[in-house]
Amino acid sequence: MKQHLVILSMLGSAALSAQTTFTGTPDSIIDAINWNNGLPTLTNQGTISSDAIWPSDNNLDGWDLVLTEGTLTDGSTSYLLNEIMGETKFDIQGGTWQRGGVVRLHGGATVSINGGTANLGGIAAISAAVGGGEDGGFTLNVANGSMTMNNVINFNNQENTSTINVSGGTLTMGNVSMDTRVIDEANTLFNISGGTLDTYSLRMSAADNNIVVTISGGEVSIGAGEYIPNSLDGITDQRYINFPDSSTGTLTIADATQLTFEEFHTNGTLLFNGSNTTPFDKVFSVEGSTLSLRASTQSLEITNATFNPATKEVTLRWTDTGATYLIESTNDLNFSENVSEISVDETADTTSFPGEIAFTFTDPGAAQKRFWRIKIDS
Protein backbone atom coordinates (compact mmCIF):
# COMPACT_ATOMS: atom_id res chain seq x y z
CA MET A 1 0.00 0.00 0.00
CA LYS A 2 2.79 2.38 0.83
CA GLN A 3 4.43 1.67 -2.53
CA HIS A 4 1.23 2.61 -4.36
CA LEU A 5 1.06 5.87 -2.42
CA VAL A 6 4.62 6.75 -3.37
CA ILE A 7 3.96 6.02 -7.04
CA LEU A 8 0.84 8.18 -7.05
CA SER A 9 2.77 10.98 -5.40
CA MET A 10 5.47 10.78 -8.05
CA LEU A 11 2.90 10.85 -10.84
CA GLY A 12 1.23 13.89 -9.30
CA SER A 13 4.57 15.67 -9.06
CA ALA A 14 5.40 14.89 -12.67
CA ALA A 15 2.05 16.23 -13.83
CA LEU A 16 2.57 19.51 -12.00
CA SER A 17 6.01 20.00 -13.52
CA ALA A 18 4.98 19.44 -17.15
CA GLN A 19 6.58 21.83 -19.61
CA THR A 20 6.30 22.73 -23.24
CA THR A 21 8.79 24.62 -25.41
CA PHE A 22 8.06 26.87 -28.37
CA THR A 23 9.73 25.44 -31.49
CA GLY A 24 8.31 27.62 -34.25
CA THR A 25 10.57 30.42 -35.47
CA PRO A 26 8.98 32.91 -35.76
CA ASP A 27 5.53 31.32 -36.10
CA SER A 28 2.36 31.82 -34.07
CA ILE A 29 2.32 30.87 -30.39
CA ILE A 30 -1.41 30.14 -30.71
CA ASP A 31 -0.80 27.15 -33.02
CA ALA A 32 -0.24 23.97 -30.98
CA ILE A 33 1.97 22.53 -33.74
CA ASN A 34 4.64 25.11 -32.80
CA TRP A 35 5.06 23.63 -29.29
CA ASN A 36 6.82 20.35 -28.48
CA ASN A 37 4.30 19.36 -25.81
CA GLY A 38 1.09 21.13 -26.75
CA LEU A 39 -0.11 24.63 -25.90
CA PRO A 40 0.78 26.06 -22.48
CA THR A 41 -1.71 25.71 -19.64
CA LEU A 42 -1.57 26.49 -15.94
CA THR A 43 -0.15 22.98 -15.41
CA ASN A 44 1.98 22.88 -18.57
CA GLN A 45 4.36 25.85 -18.44
CA GLY A 46 5.43 27.16 -21.83
CA THR A 47 8.83 28.67 -22.55
CA ILE A 48 9.67 30.95 -25.50
CA SER A 49 13.38 31.45 -26.16
CA SER A 50 13.30 32.57 -29.81
CA ASP A 51 11.39 35.03 -32.01
CA ALA A 52 7.65 34.38 -32.00
CA ILE A 53 4.37 35.91 -33.13
CA TRP A 54 1.27 36.46 -30.99
CA PRO A 55 -1.47 37.31 -33.52
CA SER A 56 -4.10 39.88 -32.58
CA ASP A 57 -7.58 38.75 -31.56
CA ASN A 58 -6.09 35.71 -29.84
CA ASN A 59 -6.10 35.59 -26.05
CA LEU A 60 -3.95 33.98 -23.39
CA ASP A 61 -6.58 32.25 -21.29
CA GLY A 62 -5.31 29.98 -18.51
CA TRP A 63 -1.68 29.92 -19.68
CA ASP A 64 1.61 29.78 -17.78
CA LEU A 65 4.11 31.43 -20.14
CA VAL A 66 7.78 32.42 -19.76
CA LEU A 67 9.73 34.56 -22.25
CA THR A 68 13.51 34.16 -21.88
CA GLU A 69 14.95 35.26 -25.25
CA GLY A 70 13.91 36.53 -28.67
CA THR A 71 11.12 38.96 -29.56
CA LEU A 72 7.44 38.19 -29.07
CA THR A 73 5.58 40.51 -31.43
CA ASP A 74 2.21 40.98 -33.12
CA GLY A 75 2.61 43.70 -35.73
CA SER A 76 -0.91 44.95 -34.98
CA THR A 77 -2.32 48.44 -35.26
CA SER A 78 -3.20 50.41 -32.16
CA TYR A 79 -6.87 49.40 -31.97
CA LEU A 80 -6.46 45.61 -32.26
CA LEU A 81 -6.89 43.67 -29.06
CA ASN A 82 -5.34 40.77 -27.19
CA GLU A 83 -6.48 39.72 -23.73
CA ILE A 84 -4.61 38.09 -20.86
CA MET A 85 -7.09 36.40 -18.53
CA GLY A 86 -8.15 33.17 -16.83
CA GLU A 87 -5.44 33.44 -14.12
CA THR A 88 -2.75 33.44 -16.82
CA LYS A 89 0.84 33.93 -15.63
CA PHE A 90 3.13 35.68 -18.12
CA ASP A 91 6.71 36.05 -16.87
CA ILE A 92 9.20 38.05 -18.95
CA GLN A 93 12.70 37.04 -17.84
CA GLY A 94 14.55 38.19 -20.95
CA GLY A 95 14.04 39.10 -24.58
CA THR A 96 11.39 41.58 -25.74
CA TRP A 97 7.60 41.69 -25.75
CA GLN A 98 6.59 44.10 -28.53
CA ARG A 99 2.90 44.92 -28.75
CA GLY A 100 1.33 47.43 -31.15
CA GLY A 101 -2.28 47.00 -30.10
CA VAL A 102 -4.36 47.09 -26.93
CA VAL A 103 -3.62 44.69 -24.09
CA ARG A 104 -6.56 43.93 -21.83
CA LEU A 105 -5.77 42.37 -18.46
CA HIS A 106 -8.39 40.80 -16.17
CA GLY A 107 -9.55 37.53 -14.69
CA GLY A 108 -6.78 37.20 -12.12
CA ALA A 109 -3.99 37.47 -14.69
CA THR A 110 -0.41 38.18 -13.53
CA VAL A 111 2.22 39.78 -15.76
CA SER A 112 5.77 39.96 -14.34
CA ILE A 113 8.80 41.79 -15.72
CA ASN A 114 11.86 40.09 -14.20
CA GLY A 115 14.26 41.03 -16.99
CA GLY A 116 14.21 41.97 -20.64
CA THR A 117 11.90 44.57 -22.12
CA ALA A 118 8.20 45.09 -22.77
CA ASN A 119 7.01 47.81 -25.17
CA LEU A 120 3.25 48.33 -25.43
CA GLY A 121 1.83 50.92 -27.80
CA GLY A 122 -1.89 50.43 -28.35
CA ILE A 123 -4.48 53.19 -28.06
CA ALA A 124 -5.02 51.88 -24.51
CA ALA A 125 -1.74 50.20 -23.71
CA ILE A 126 -3.28 48.32 -20.80
CA SER A 127 -6.99 48.21 -20.24
CA ALA A 128 -9.13 46.27 -17.80
CA ALA A 129 -12.04 44.24 -19.08
CA VAL A 130 -15.06 45.89 -20.66
CA GLY A 131 -17.96 45.81 -18.25
CA GLY A 132 -15.88 46.34 -15.15
CA GLY A 133 -13.78 43.20 -15.09
CA GLU A 134 -16.36 41.25 -13.10
CA ASP A 135 -14.19 38.12 -13.43
CA GLY A 136 -11.38 39.65 -11.36
CA GLY A 137 -8.62 42.21 -11.52
CA PHE A 138 -4.99 41.74 -12.55
CA THR A 139 -1.49 42.03 -11.09
CA LEU A 140 1.49 43.65 -12.81
CA ASN A 141 4.92 43.14 -11.23
CA VAL A 142 8.03 45.01 -12.37
CA ALA A 143 11.13 43.75 -10.55
CA ASN A 144 13.88 44.07 -13.18
CA GLY A 145 14.25 45.13 -16.77
CA SER A 146 11.75 47.63 -18.16
CA MET A 147 8.18 48.03 -19.32
CA THR A 148 7.10 51.00 -21.42
CA MET A 149 3.47 51.82 -22.16
CA ASN A 150 3.63 54.33 -24.97
CA ASN A 151 0.06 55.52 -24.88
CA VAL A 152 -2.95 56.00 -22.60
CA ILE A 153 -3.10 53.69 -19.60
CA ASN A 154 -6.78 53.15 -19.04
CA PHE A 155 -8.13 50.91 -16.28
CA ASN A 156 -11.81 51.15 -17.11
CA ASN A 157 -14.52 50.76 -14.50
CA GLN A 158 -12.86 47.97 -12.58
CA GLU A 159 -15.22 46.20 -10.23
CA ASN A 160 -12.31 44.24 -8.76
CA THR A 161 -9.01 45.62 -7.50
CA SER A 162 -5.90 45.45 -9.66
CA THR A 163 -2.40 45.88 -8.26
CA ILE A 164 0.79 47.21 -9.84
CA ASN A 165 4.00 46.49 -7.93
CA VAL A 166 7.33 48.11 -8.82
CA SER A 167 10.26 46.76 -6.78
CA GLY A 168 13.06 47.26 -9.33
CA GLY A 169 13.66 48.11 -12.97
CA THR A 170 11.58 50.80 -14.69
CA LEU A 171 7.88 51.13 -15.47
CA THR A 172 7.19 54.00 -17.90
CA MET A 173 3.58 55.02 -18.52
CA GLY A 174 2.02 57.49 -20.91
CA ASN A 175 2.89 59.21 -24.15
CA VAL A 176 4.68 62.52 -23.56
CA SER A 177 2.75 64.12 -26.41
CA MET A 178 -0.70 63.26 -25.08
CA ASP A 179 -2.37 65.17 -22.27
CA THR A 180 -4.49 62.22 -21.17
CA ARG A 181 -5.17 60.20 -18.05
CA VAL A 182 -2.97 57.27 -17.18
CA ILE A 183 -5.28 56.05 -14.43
CA ASP A 184 -8.99 56.07 -15.09
CA GLU A 185 -11.76 54.83 -12.84
CA ALA A 186 -11.51 52.85 -9.62
CA ASN A 187 -9.62 50.08 -7.86
CA THR A 188 -6.04 50.49 -9.00
CA LEU A 189 -3.35 50.15 -6.34
CA PHE A 190 0.30 51.03 -6.97
CA ASN A 191 2.99 49.77 -4.59
CA ILE A 192 6.42 51.27 -5.28
CA SER A 193 9.20 49.76 -3.13
CA GLY A 194 12.17 50.12 -5.50
CA GLY A 195 13.08 50.90 -9.08
CA THR A 196 11.33 53.71 -10.95
CA LEU A 197 7.77 54.56 -11.94
CA ASP A 198 8.01 57.26 -14.60
CA THR A 199 4.67 58.53 -15.83
CA TYR A 200 3.64 61.46 -18.01
CA SER A 201 0.65 62.09 -15.79
CA LEU A 202 -1.24 60.66 -12.86
CA ARG A 203 -4.83 61.67 -13.40
CA MET A 204 -7.50 60.02 -11.33
CA SER A 205 -11.13 59.89 -12.29
CA ALA A 206 -13.37 62.33 -10.44
CA ALA A 207 -16.14 59.73 -10.12
CA ASP A 208 -14.46 56.70 -8.55
CA ASN A 209 -12.34 55.88 -5.54
CA ASN A 210 -9.69 53.42 -4.36
CA ILE A 211 -6.83 54.68 -6.51
CA VAL A 212 -3.84 54.64 -4.16
CA VAL A 213 -0.10 54.98 -4.78
CA THR A 214 2.10 53.78 -1.90
CA ILE A 215 5.77 54.82 -2.04
CA SER A 216 7.91 52.85 0.41
CA GLY A 217 11.06 53.05 -1.73
CA GLY A 218 12.26 53.75 -5.25
CA GLU A 219 11.40 56.77 -7.35
CA VAL A 220 8.09 58.06 -8.70
CA SER A 221 8.33 60.76 -11.36
CA ILE A 222 5.27 62.55 -12.77
CA GLY A 223 5.81 64.66 -15.88
CA ALA A 224 4.13 67.61 -17.55
CA GLY A 225 0.72 65.93 -17.49
CA GLU A 226 0.72 66.57 -13.73
CA TYR A 227 -0.70 64.84 -10.67
CA ILE A 228 -4.44 65.53 -10.68
CA PRO A 229 -6.23 63.43 -8.05
CA ASN A 230 -9.61 65.07 -8.74
CA SER A 231 -10.50 65.05 -5.07
CA LEU A 232 -11.49 67.58 -2.44
CA ASP A 233 -10.78 65.02 0.28
CA GLY A 234 -8.36 62.32 -0.81
CA ILE A 235 -8.70 60.30 2.40
CA THR A 236 -12.48 60.02 2.09
CA ASP A 237 -12.39 59.49 -1.67
CA GLN A 238 -9.47 57.04 -1.40
CA ARG A 239 -7.48 58.84 -4.11
CA TYR A 240 -4.03 59.71 -2.83
CA ILE A 241 -0.27 59.11 -2.70
CA ASN A 242 0.95 57.70 0.63
CA PHE A 243 4.43 57.60 2.17
CA PRO A 244 4.48 54.96 4.93
CA ASP A 245 6.69 55.34 7.99
CA SER A 246 10.38 54.68 7.14
CA SER A 247 9.85 55.18 3.40
CA THR A 248 13.07 55.84 1.49
CA GLY A 249 11.25 56.70 -1.74
CA THR A 250 10.99 59.99 -3.59
CA LEU A 251 8.22 61.74 -5.51
CA THR A 252 9.09 64.18 -8.29
CA ILE A 253 6.39 66.25 -10.01
CA ALA A 254 7.46 68.42 -12.93
CA ASP A 255 7.59 72.12 -11.96
CA ALA A 256 6.18 71.44 -8.48
CA THR A 257 7.15 73.66 -5.56
CA GLN A 258 6.90 73.08 -1.83
CA LEU A 259 3.56 74.91 -1.92
CA THR A 260 2.30 72.40 -4.50
CA PHE A 261 3.09 69.48 -2.22
CA GLU A 262 1.69 71.27 0.82
CA GLU A 263 -1.64 71.79 -0.94
CA PHE A 264 -1.84 68.08 -1.77
CA HIS A 265 -1.10 67.27 1.87
CA THR A 266 -3.81 69.67 3.08
CA ASN A 267 -6.53 68.11 0.94
CA GLY A 268 -5.53 64.56 1.83
CA THR A 269 -4.12 63.52 -1.55
CA LEU A 270 -0.55 63.32 -0.20
CA LEU A 271 -0.27 61.42 3.08
CA PHE A 272 2.26 60.27 5.65
CA ASN A 273 1.38 56.90 7.17
CA GLY A 274 -2.14 57.14 5.76
CA SER A 275 -2.87 60.50 7.40
CA ASN A 276 -2.39 64.25 6.92
CA THR A 277 -2.72 65.18 10.60
CA THR A 278 1.02 65.68 11.19
CA PRO A 279 2.20 69.10 9.93
CA PHE A 280 3.79 68.90 6.48
CA ASP A 281 7.19 70.26 7.47
CA LYS A 282 7.47 67.75 10.32
CA VAL A 283 7.44 64.76 8.00
CA PHE A 284 8.30 65.91 4.46
CA SER A 285 11.31 67.54 2.86
CA VAL A 286 11.29 69.20 -0.56
CA GLU A 287 14.33 69.78 -2.73
CA GLY A 288 13.54 71.42 -6.04
CA SER A 289 10.53 69.48 -7.36
CA THR A 290 11.31 66.30 -5.40
CA LEU A 291 9.62 65.25 -2.17
CA SER A 292 10.87 62.72 0.39
CA LEU A 293 10.45 61.96 4.08
CA ARG A 294 12.54 63.84 6.58
CA ALA A 295 15.28 61.68 8.08
CA SER A 296 13.70 61.88 11.53
CA THR A 297 10.57 60.09 10.28
CA GLN A 298 12.54 57.09 9.09
CA SER A 299 12.79 54.30 11.67
CA LEU A 300 15.55 51.80 12.31
CA GLU A 301 15.54 48.32 13.78
CA ILE A 302 18.55 47.35 15.89
CA THR A 303 19.10 43.63 15.28
CA ASN A 304 22.16 43.00 17.49
CA ALA A 305 24.30 44.74 20.15
CA THR A 306 27.45 43.57 21.95
CA PHE A 307 29.81 45.22 24.47
CA ASN A 308 33.34 44.18 25.46
CA PRO A 309 34.01 45.68 28.94
CA ALA A 310 37.73 44.99 28.71
CA THR A 311 38.23 47.06 25.56
CA LYS A 312 35.07 49.20 25.79
CA GLU A 313 34.32 48.17 22.22
CA VAL A 314 30.68 48.25 21.19
CA THR A 315 29.21 46.60 18.08
CA LEU A 316 25.75 47.63 16.94
CA ARG A 317 23.90 46.16 13.97
CA TRP A 318 20.80 47.63 12.36
CA THR A 319 18.71 47.63 9.20
CA ASP A 320 20.09 49.81 6.45
CA THR A 321 17.79 52.55 5.12
CA GLY A 322 20.44 54.02 2.85
CA ALA A 323 20.90 57.10 5.04
CA THR A 324 23.88 58.52 6.97
CA TYR A 325 24.06 57.40 10.60
CA LEU A 326 25.31 58.77 13.91
CA ILE A 327 25.81 56.78 17.14
CA GLU A 328 24.82 58.63 20.31
CA SER A 329 25.67 57.43 23.83
CA THR A 330 24.77 58.65 27.30
CA ASN A 331 24.98 57.56 30.95
CA ASP A 332 21.40 58.30 31.95
CA LEU A 333 19.11 57.95 28.90
CA ASN A 334 18.96 61.72 28.62
CA PHE A 335 19.86 62.21 24.98
CA SER A 336 19.32 65.97 25.15
CA GLU A 337 22.56 66.82 26.98
CA ASN A 338 26.04 65.39 27.71
CA VAL A 339 25.73 63.07 24.76
CA SER A 340 28.75 61.51 23.06
CA GLU A 341 28.54 61.20 19.27
CA ILE A 342 30.37 58.74 17.02
CA SER A 343 29.99 59.13 13.27
CA VAL A 344 29.45 55.91 11.35
CA ASP A 345 32.21 55.96 8.75
CA GLU A 346 33.46 53.77 5.91
CA THR A 347 34.80 51.16 8.35
CA ALA A 348 31.24 49.93 8.95
CA ASP A 349 30.57 46.37 7.82
CA THR A 350 27.94 46.45 5.07
CA THR A 351 28.53 42.99 3.58
CA SER A 352 28.43 40.36 6.34
CA PHE A 353 24.71 40.83 6.98
CA PRO A 354 22.77 41.65 3.78
CA GLY A 355 20.46 44.61 4.28
CA GLU A 356 22.12 45.51 7.58
CA ILE A 357 25.04 47.57 8.86
CA ALA A 358 27.37 46.43 11.66
CA PHE A 359 29.57 49.10 13.23
CA THR A 360 32.21 48.64 15.93
CA PHE A 361 33.50 51.60 17.95
CA THR A 362 35.21 52.38 21.26
CA ASP A 363 32.83 54.05 23.65
CA PRO A 364 34.36 57.21 25.20
CA GLY A 365 32.37 56.98 28.44
CA ALA A 366 33.76 55.91 31.79
CA ALA A 367 30.53 55.12 33.68
CA GLN A 368 29.39 51.60 34.56
CA LYS A 369 26.14 52.04 32.60
CA ARG A 370 25.96 53.30 29.04
CA PHE A 371 23.05 53.67 26.64
CA TRP A 372 23.40 53.86 22.87
CA ARG A 373 21.09 54.76 20.06
CA ILE A 374 21.46 55.03 16.28
CA LYS A 375 20.32 58.28 14.75
CA ILE A 376 19.66 59.00 11.09
CA ASP A 377 21.95 61.96 10.53
CA SER A 378 20.10 64.81 8.86
Image: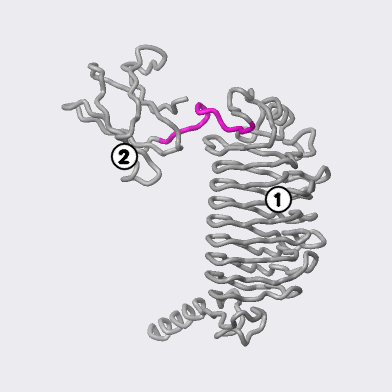
Q: In the shown orientation, is residue 227 left or right of residue 13?
A: right
Q: Nearer the viewer, mark 2 or mark 1?
A: 2
Q: Is residue 293 magenta?
A: yes
Q: Amino acid at mark 1?
A: Thr
- What residue sits 58% from the left and 37% below the top? 250
Residue tagged by mark 2? Answer: 349
Q: In the shown orientation, is residue 355 left or right of residue 72?
A: left
**The residue tagged with tag 1: helix, strand or loop?**
strand
> Looking at the rendering, in which quadrant would you find the N terminus?
bottom left
Q: Is residue 77 magenta?
A: no
Give the image location of residue 369, x and y in percent.
27, 20
Q: Amino acid at mark 2?
A: Asp
The residue sitting at the left extreme is: 310
Report the magenta residues as a range.
Answer: 289-301
Front one among 220 and 313: 220
- What residue sits 39% from the left and 15% below the top? 334
- Measure the alpha-carbon separation of dots 2 and 1: 40 Å
Q: Are marks 2 and 1 in contact (CB under 8 Å)?
A: no
Front one among 40 and 195: 195
Residue tagged by mark 1? Answer: 188
Nearest to N terminus: mark 2 or mark 1: 1
Residue 326 higher or lower than 252, as above or below:
above
Give the image location of residue 288, x and y in percent.
62, 29
**The residue tagged with tag 2: helix, strand or loop?**
loop
- What residue sits 68% from the left and 34% below the top? 270
Give the image location of residue 220, x and y in percent.
62, 42
Residue 338 higher or lower than 120, as above or below:
above
